[in-house]
Image (tube, rainbow, N blue to C red):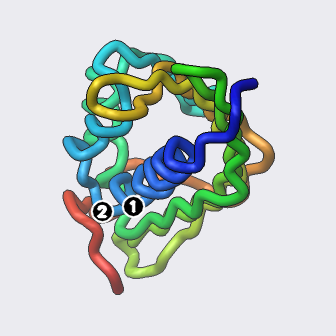
Amino acid sequence: MSAYDPEAVVEIQQKIYRYGWCIDHRLYDELDSIFAPDAVLHYDVSGGTMKPWAEMKGWLRERFPVFRVTQHNMSNPVIDLDGETATSTTYGHLVHVQHLKDETTSVFRHYAIYRDNWQRTADGWRIQLRRLSNLYMEGPVYGPDRVYTYDELTPF
C-alpha cells in the first residue's frame, strides 16, 4: 500500500456515494464518470448478471422502472490505495419500493457488499471491476405485469 493520499480517498468516497444517488435518480449516463468505459460489473446475486459497463447500463435502464422509489445507502467504505490503483469495499443497504396495481406497496431490502477495483485515469478515478455480493435479501420483487412502472424516481 502506498502513502495515504487524502485527495484520492475523498474522490473515491464521493464516487461511491454518487453511484447510489445516480442509481436512485436514474441518472445512468452520469455513471460514466464513475465506471471506466471497459469496466466489468458482476452483480453476484439472485437475478443478477455480469456484463461490461455499456451493457450493464442498458440492463439497469430495463430493470429499474418496476421500482417507484429506490434508496441505495452506501456506507463504511474502506479504501486501500496502491499507486495508480485502489480497492474499495463498501456496505450497501439497498431499498426498493414497488407500487402494485392493486394500490398496495411492496418493499424489497437488499443488504450487500460492493467490492471495487479502481484505476486512476486522466479523468480521475474510475471503477474497472465491481462485484456486488449478497449478505441478505428480504421481500419480493414483482414484474411489470403486477406493478406500475416509472422512468424516474417518483416519491409517494
Q: CA distance from mark 2 to mark 1?
A: 6 Å
Direction from residue 111 to residue 141 in the image, left or right: left
Name the spot of residue 84 as percent of width and height, x first: 52, 20
Q: Residue sitting at 48 percent across and 68 percent down?
A: 97
Q: Residue sitting at 46 percent across and 80 percent down?
A: 104
Q: Residue sitting at 65 percent across and 36 percent down?
A: 88
Q: Which quarter of the picture shows residue 1?
A: top right
Which residue bears the numbered disc 1? 21
Q: Is residue 135 visible?
A: yes
Task: Name the one closer to the observer, 147 or 52.
Answer: 52
Question: Callout 2: 10 Å neighbours few (<14), some, many (20+)?
Answer: some
Question: Callout 1: 10 Å neighbours few (<14), some, many (20+)?
Answer: some
Amino acid at dot 1:
Trp
Q: Is residue 45 visible?
A: no
- Residue 149 vertical position relative to residue 122 in the rendered view, above or below: below
Task: Name the one closer to the observer, 153 or 80.
Answer: 80
Total numbered labels placed on residues in the image: 2
Name the spot of residue 4 as percent of width and height, x first: 68, 40
Q: Residue sitting at 70 percent across and 51 percent down?
A: 91
Which residue bears the numbered disc 2? 25
Direction from residue 43 to residue 81 in the image, left or right: right
- Say if mark 2 contacts mark 1, CB within 8 Å: yes
Point out the image quarter for the C terminus: bottom left
Name the spot of residue 102 as percent of width and height, x first: 39, 76
Amino acid at dot 2:
His
